[in-house]
Image (tube, coloured by chain):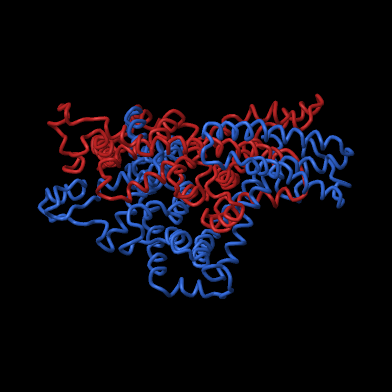
Amino acid sequence: MTATAETTTAAPPATGTPGRFSKWPVYLVVVVIAALWTIPSLGLLVNSFREPGSIRAEGWWTVFPLKIFDTAAWTLDNYSRVLDEGFGNAFANTLAVSIPSVVIPITIAAFAAYAFAWMSFPGRNTLFVIVVGLMVVPLQMALIPILRVYTRFDLVGTYPAVWLAHAGFGLPLAVYLLRNYMGSLPSSIIESANIDGADHFSIFSRLIVPLSVPVLASFAIFQFLWVWNDYLVALIFLGPEPSRRVLTVELADLAGRGEGALNLLPAAAFVTMILPMVVFFALQRFFVRGLTAGSVKG
Amino acid sequence: MTTPPILDEDAPRQRPLEDTQAGTNSIGVWLLRIASALVVPAVVVLFFFAFTFLKNEDTNKGVQVLVALIVGILGVWALYWGMDRLTNLLPAVAAHGVRPFVFAGPAMVLLGFYLVYPAVNTTIISFKDNRSTNWIGFDNYVRLFTESPYLISLRNSLVWVLVVPVLAVSVGLGFATMVDKLGRRTESVTKSLIFLPMAISFVGASVVWTFIYSFRPEGFGSQIGVLNGIWSALGGDPVNWLQSRPWNNLLLMVILVWLQTGFSMVILSSAIKGVPDVLLEAARIDGATEWQAFWRVVFPSIASTVVVVWTTVLITVWKVFDIVWVMTGGRDGTQVVAQQMVQEFFTNRNNGMGAALAVVLFVAVVPILVINVRRFRAQEAMR
């Protein structure tokens, strides 16, 4: 927008430095920064397709420029080995943890958000201010007591324990986002539905929820990426037992094995990243919106 | 805009649906309210945990997820519906008073259990010993502010929150400003590249940077880390970066800057695009250089967004755990508060100390909490 404005405006070249300036230095700096930001992941991607021996023997940059075309230098073995050695299982575990951890808080938060936006009840304002406050409470505050309760009832290592924990930790942001969105919907819609004899439940389920799809999507993506990439909650509540590990726990374990596992690390890391990257690229717009509103989550 | 939710108690009520609360605050109604808030969570928890197949190791994950989804969507929905129908059976006035609690109650119960109760409990535990049996007063806090590993983690965390947000915001702001002046395609491609790390987990990012900082002692093969590759090419001896104090801390911070810059860039970029072109045109016609136009026109108009982004990054940085945990495990003077907390509680089994560190993490963000609440109230008053 500004770029076009700039080229079309005939700003008089004032003394010394004019309003218009050469774009090449800017272009150069932008490309350098973008390259700096890309090289780390690019190196990892290159490494993940190299022969295991060469991953350990030489830096990934040595494939440039000659070995790129040498088919013997490239392999998919790392990926198949990684998937066999726990990461296939961990991928399934992570899906099993993530999907319910996104769905459950959305349903519960939507009902609460509707009440905060369109119903009046004693304590409404106080409760909502508490929700706003809870958004920044660090997760670490909750770990010890919840782990104790879970241990007492023998729930550590079960999926529902993690689902409900993620639901609880995600709720403040969800309620906050949804309530702000629902509250900004025109009250005339709700009034006319009310005149037509619709009760709260049907106004909520037939009008408000369909109208709130964009914000529900934003939160869903935000929460999905958060849960998928979470390490701490999974580590504490799901425990270190290999069969239940999620991707981040499995990857951290592999990284902790040092030199011996070095050749598996790049492929393993990409297995953990692939789904969030796809979600991210496909739904970038929704994600940004959710991020803007909700990045203060504890 | 039409009637928004009103937060200020004194403001005139313009609620379209609920016009009276008279007679709805009797004890009976309050009991019903509390009961109705508890039903949904109680049923869900009972369902999840009473069925041992969900705890059973051998149960197929797909089955578990399917059950969770059916319960999570249909079951929870049906529960709310059932509660709503039950409320209809009450006398009109009571139903009117109870219904909001049917809707909002379950969320409040979950929040109470997963955030409010633990916050109180953690604070209490922080005044007890490692097994939470004996009261030891402020001993944990005294140790925290006098003994070496804790002091180092406090110092490091402070440096992290001073350095990382400033770098992430200034690189993000600089990049957003510059890319705004280039063509559309360049802008969207380079922005995506910078933003991409946002989709990567902290653990994943640590692995990415392992191949930057990797070190091999001389005689143990050639360097496979980018940094040592460059360093050797320049004629230096390979350096064990992650063990060289105090610079290893800075190298870990770079990882988080790499992760967070995209976030600040995207938010600031949309703020910059919101600055009216007319203002910039006027400044340019008056002979302002791009530099002056930025500092005198653009920056003042986006200053509040800069503060918000900075605060947001700051909170993330303050709670950083995964990067330190995976890269160095807090060794070689790299410990930070959040990682030290998990270390104490999870590895060293010292509940009291872990809780005290968690309380420190929380107390430090209380000012931000207060600011958030105030800003929220101000926004509500404006609407």
Q: Nearer the viewer, residue B184 or B195?
A: B195
Query: Is A49 positioned to the left or the right of A158 in the image?
Result: left
**Does A179 sit above or below residue B303?**
above
Q: Is residue B15 above or below residue A127?
A: above
Q: Residue at x 24, y 37 (%)?
A: A47
Any part of residue A136 in sight: yes
Q: Is residue A146 above or below residue B288?
A: below
Please state, as top left, top right, bottom left or bottom right, where the C terminus of chain B lies in the image.
top right
Q: Colour of chain A?
A: red
User: Image point 70% across, 29% down: which residue?
Assistant: A205
* Res. A146 image quadrant: bottom right
Q: Tell me: A265 left or right of B336.
A: left
Q: Nearer the viewer, residue A118 or A166?
A: A166
- Please give the count of numbered marks on the rendered protein: 0
Image position, residue B332 (x, y; %): 30, 63
- Determine the colour of chain B: blue
Tell me which corner region of the image, top left, top right, bottom left or bottom right, holds residue B196. Answer: top left
Percent across and percent down for residue A196 are 80, 24
Rendering coords of residue B91 (x, y %): 89, 39
Report if residue B374 is visible in the image.
no
Taking the image as shown, residue A67 lies to the left or right of residue A29, namely left
Residue at 72% in and 40% down: B103
Question: Image check: A201 left or right of B137?
Answer: right
Outermost residue toward the top? A196
Q: x%, y% of residue B379?
A: 62, 46
The quadrant of the image that shows the N terminus of chain B is: top right
> What residue do we see at 33% from left, 37% from top?
A82
Q: Nearer the viewer, residue B157 or A169?
A: A169
Nearest the eye: A100 or A114 = A100
